[in-house]
Image: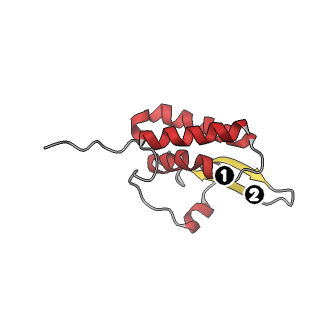
Amino acid sequence: MGIMRFLGAAVAVLAMLGVGSTAEGAKWSRTYIRQLPDSAFAAIERTPEGRTIRHLPHHDAAGNLDIPHLCNALSRLGQVKWRNPANAEIARRHLQEHLEQVGRGACRPPRKSTP
C-alpha cells in the first residue's frame, strides 16, 4: 500500500506542476507505438504466459527522448496497472532521470503573460 500512496502523491505533485496533458506534441498511433523498440518504454513486464507488456513510451523510433511523451508518461505513472509493483518505482526513477536531464520546467505549461 505504501507504493500506491507514494504514486498518488507523485501524481498530485505532477498535476500541480502542470505535467501531463498540456504538453504539446505529435500523437503517436498504436501502430507506431507497437513498432517502437523495448528501450523506448519506461518499464517492460512479462506475463506468466510470456506476453510482453510495455509501459509508458517516451523515446521515439530513433531513440531520441520525446519531451511531450515524457511529460505524459510522468502524469500517467499512477494509472498503470503493474503486474509487479516494484516496476512502478523503476519506471518512476527512469522517467525522473530524464526529467532532470531536460529540466523540470520542460513539463510545465508556458505561463500566460498578462497584458
Query: How far is the residue under mark 1 from the one under mark 2?
Result: 10 Å
Depicted 53 relative to depicted 2: above or below: below
- The type of residue carrying mark 2 is Thr
- State how the image is colored: secondary structure
Secondary structure under badge 2? Answer: strand
Depicted 47 relative to depicted 86: above or below: below
Instruction: Tell me which residue sits at (60%, 47%) in the image.
Output: 77
Percent coordinates x, y for residue 15 in the rendering: 47, 44
Q: Is residue 90 visible?
A: no
- The type of residue carrying mark 1 is Asp
Instruction: Tell me which residue sits at (20%, 42%) in the image.
Output: 113
Instruction: Tell me which residue sits at (35%, 45%) in the image.
Output: 109
Residue extending furthest toward the left = 115
Percent coordinates x, y for residue 2 in the rendering: 71, 36
Labels 1 and 2 touching (C-beta < 8 A): yes
Percent coordinates x, y for residue 47 in the rendering: 81, 56
Which quadrant is home to the N terminus? top right
First in residue order: circle 1 vs circle 2: 1
- The circle on residue 52 is 2
Which quadrant is home to the C terminus? top left
Percent coordinates x, y for residue 29 in the rendering: 52, 66
Instruction: Tell me which residue sits at (62%, 52%) in the image.
Output: 79
Q: Nearer the viewer, residue 98 or 113?
A: 113
Secondary structure under badge 1? Answer: helix
Instruction: Please give left or right for residue 72 compared with residue 37 in the image.
Output: left
Mark 1 residue crowding within 10 angstroms, few (<14) / some (14–19) / many (20+):
some
Q: Which residue is mark 1?
A: 38
Instruction: Please give left or right for residue 56 compared with residue 28 in the image.
Output: right
Depicted 18 relative to depicted 102: above or below: below
Mark 2 residue crowding within 10 angstroms, few (<14) / some (14–19) / many (20+):
few
